[in-house]
Image (spheres, rainbow, N blue to C red):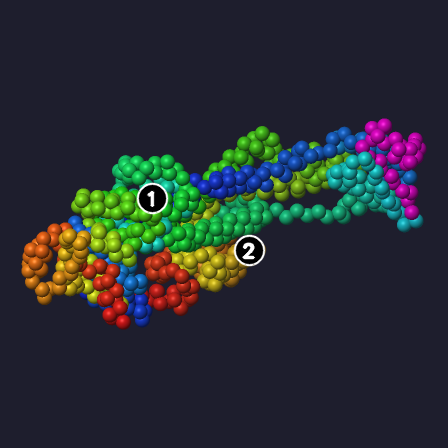
Amino acid sequence: MRLRTIKVVIGREYMSRVKKKSFLVTTFLVPVIFAAICVLPTIIMMLAEDKDKNVAVIDQSGVVMPFLESSPMATYTDYTDVASIEELKTGCKNMGLDAIVEISPLDSAKNLSVNTYSLKPISIDLKDNIASNVNDALEAYRVDSYEIADLKQIMNDVKADVKVSTYTIDESGQSKISSAEVYMGLSFILSTIIYMFIAMFSGMVMQSVIEEKASRVVEVLVSSVKATELMLGKIVGVAMVALTQFFLWIVLTAGIVTAVGGIVGFDKIAGSGDVEQISQMTGMDPSMLDAAGIDADQIMAAASGEQSEIAAVFDTLKDINWAQFIIAFVVMFILGYLLYASLFAAIGSAVDNEADTQQLQLPVTAPLLIAFFIAIYAFKSPDSAVVWWGSMIPFTSPIVMLARIPYGVAAWELALSIALQFVTFLGCAWVSAKIYKVGILMFGKKSTFKDLWKWIKMK
Amino acid sequence: MANIIECKGICKSFGEKVALDHVDVCVPEGKIFGLLGPNGAGKTTLIRIINRITIPGEGEVLFDGRPITQDDIEKIGYLPEERGLYRKMTVGDQAMYLAQIKGMSAKEAAAELKKWFVKFGIESWWNKKVEELSKGMAQKVQFITTVVHKPKLLILDEPFSGFDPVNAQLIRQEILALKEQGATIMLSTHNMESVEELCDNIALFNKSKVVLTGEVDAIRREYGNHNVEVEYTDSEGRHTLVATPGEDRNAVLKELMDKGAVINSYKELMPRMNDIFIKLVKGEE
């Protein structure tokens, strides 16, 4: 092994990929998409609110109108005895109405139906607002109709709305509010990304081997560089492309999220919300709550329930030791990638073109897929036996271990998994190099597993 | 004269198939050495063994009198029969890369490549992608990448295939120029005319063995029947006469001169390499 030559090979493998348009596009587009996924819901929530809709109401039931309190979203005007539905429909545009709500008389089952008419389709928020108001009105009316004293109060008292708050405790017993969903999400995202990275970049190694073989440049190369040096240089070069992309993604995503967050006041949501904000998020109007007879304590209770959940998500996100995840990802990716890339390099060397890889690829892609499925299972039950073994067996461990990490993994488990992984890599690289050395100079013959076995045994 | 390459008792088999069977080849320094033989005779396998692409089953290769090492590879330039460059890379990047894996520094490589590109009149190709070049153009680039690091030993597998006559002539001149500068050249070829024109020594392979090796002139003389061709002009015009070794040549000439004929030329008839090749290869079947 001569370091200088390997460096030159790494340089070519790295530069030729980093300079490609497709690399630039994915490197800069993905963080934008990723940041958009993080930030967009907040922005949409803030921008897409309906404002000042002018809604005419014809309430034939006589019970709903008092509940249709005007809000910043819509102003409800009672037209019940002022105009007929037909007049409103024809005059809709002239009167400057955004929507007309027609509420039917109560039927014998104390039920009613609601129709809305509008020139442009009304938003889902407005529709929900109308529906919940009408429901509240109808519930209140039905409760009243029992004519039991204090029934309304009783109903409110029995209404259960329990929030489960999750805390993680450290060894000293300090508890921290945390969100289980955040860990699940993180586990899922991490294992998906590492799976994609390993599959994508080790596949890239295979393609590159095939390209060199198909273009016959390989013979000149191995007359200057040893086959093992070439294979090693290629694997390392592509790994550096992967890591470059990964770090650019992190930096860019973080940058975009922070920038956009700063502009739209992203943190506000996580902070101590007032009733206004909470009701905005839950799509309810505070005055409406009052009208429904829910007392202030309950509002606050409900509000703090909502708040603590969202706060928990943000607190959890803030508390996460991101450096730990990034290091874990990089280590697991490197180990998993090295293992799979060396196998894929061997497969690439044994074929003349990509179409022939199918059969040989199967034993290598299968464990990768299995690993991904175990990882998906891991984020539901991180402590199951399948997941534990999956995080130890070298071919599945990089992906499954990463899925486990958000839930906490003992240091010895991590060390054992990494050690096993590394030893397996050395073994596979040795076997792969043997196949590779012979394979890259074999042309015109479709190689089988029997051939590969012969090559491994060859001196 | 010292041998730059000595192959001693090289054997190589791929599974059941024997590719080389106790092959001995000595390549004298500063000469052009031809590897001849029908397809599948083992020439390319020997070339790969010298290049350390393939490890011999038995025997050893000496470079400058010592067993060859990976570091010696930098002193070799190799043009394989199956030419190939990265299609998506630019000509310049590619040439720089191939020069650097042969041990040149980036600076040195850039300077040397520039000279060659100017010499071949292809400076404008530097930023072109290889896939934009024609086959002949790509071959020129590949030839440059083979010789740019000033190898002591140049191994060319079928160097003229794929070139048009004009460019083949250019390559031929470059080969001779490199020899002038002290390089040793091994070339495998089916083109017997270029063997006669270029090669000082040859080794003829057939069925995994070297069946004939030595200096080209000596071989041709040996395989010739030592007939002499005399061309003369007398009062009736030009004539040629072939004298067999059994005849007294001086007597033949004297007789002609006495008759008043003018001798235009007198030369030993050498067999064509082509004929020797066919004779030896067919004779073994």
Residue B177, percent across and down? 21, 44
Residue positioned 24% across, 58% down in the render: B35
Indicate yes or no whether the magenta region holds residue B204: no
What is the secondary structure assignment of the residue under circle 2? helix
Residue positioned 53% across, 39% down in the render: A29
| In the rendered image, the vertical position of residue A415 relative to residue A79, given as above or below | below
Residue positioned 50% across, 51% down in the render: A196
Say whether residue A304 is visible.
yes
> In screen coordinates, is B101 left or right of A250?
left
Q: CA distance from mark 1 to mark 2?
A: 52 Å
Q: Quadrant of residue A285?
A: top right
Residue A233, percent across and down? 35, 49
Q: Which residues are magenta?
A: A79-107
Amino acid at circle 2: Ile
Residue A366, percent across and down? 49, 61
Q: Specify the label residue A376 is tagged with.
A: 2
Which residue is disc 1 drawn over?
A: B141
